[in-house]
Amino acid sequence: SLHDALPIWCWDSRIEDCRFDGARCQHLGLLRTEVADCSFAGADFRQAALGAWSGGGNVYRRVSFAQADFRVGSCPAATFIDCDFSHARLEKVDFQSSSFVRCRFAGDLREVMFYDHGFQTGKPDPNPMEDVDFSGAVLHDVEFRRLNLDKVTFPKSGHLVVRDYRCVLERALAELTGDPAREARLLKVSLEHRLQWAGPDQQVG
């Protein structure tokens, strides 16, 4: 347990082939560290710092965060490759510039934000959102900002997947223009917000 201890920081390190299942990691901070072939299944990361950028960022390869409490304090510039977030508790997490490649999400995600690039994080490369699987997830107020999502697998049920995404939004907004009904005005504001954050070549959403 790191919960009752002073903050523990690891930097310029490599953590490999370790199991931290069920660990209490609220005071953990990682900087310029690579974590590979590890399991944090059921671990508690509330308020942990897992993704800061300081001339480099943290890289997680083949790491399981399954059923972890991932309500982290910050994770603005990490790279996740072949990681499993199945049934992790993801609420009010802003991933900013963090990158995801061949990652899997399942269960509820609430108020989670994915960007192509966050704000002043220092991380130069954009989030490719490549082969990311949400097929077993339920998305509640989850936002994808400026991302082209053609390599994302969306949930199998309970969601409306829209093709020709930007075109549909623009057409819907044109149809709503001038409609005085309160519901129409609210929907117009919502669709304008989505169009503002749509990826430049986004075809599906």
Image (cartoon, rainbow, N blue to C red):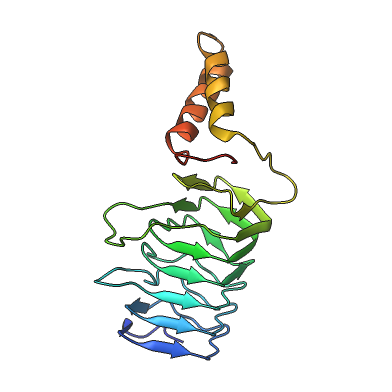
In front here: 40 or 166?
A: 166
In the image, residue 37 above or below residue 185: below
Q: Position of residue 139 (x, y in %)?
A: 61, 50
The residue most toward the front is 201
Q: Quadrant of residue 6?
A: bottom left
Q: Position of residue 26 (x, y in %)?
A: 42, 76
Residue at (64, 36) in percent of width and height: 163
Residue at (36, 71) in percent of width and height: 49
Quadrant holding the C terminus: top right
Q: Quadrant of residue 58?
A: bottom left
The residue most toward the right is 157
In front here: 104 or 47?
A: 104
Camera sees residue 78: yes
Residue at (52, 84) in percent of width and height: 23
In the image, residue 200 above or below residue 28: above
Q: In this rendering, would 124 be left or right of 1?
A: left
Camera sees residue 46: no
In the image, residue 73 above or below residue 200: below
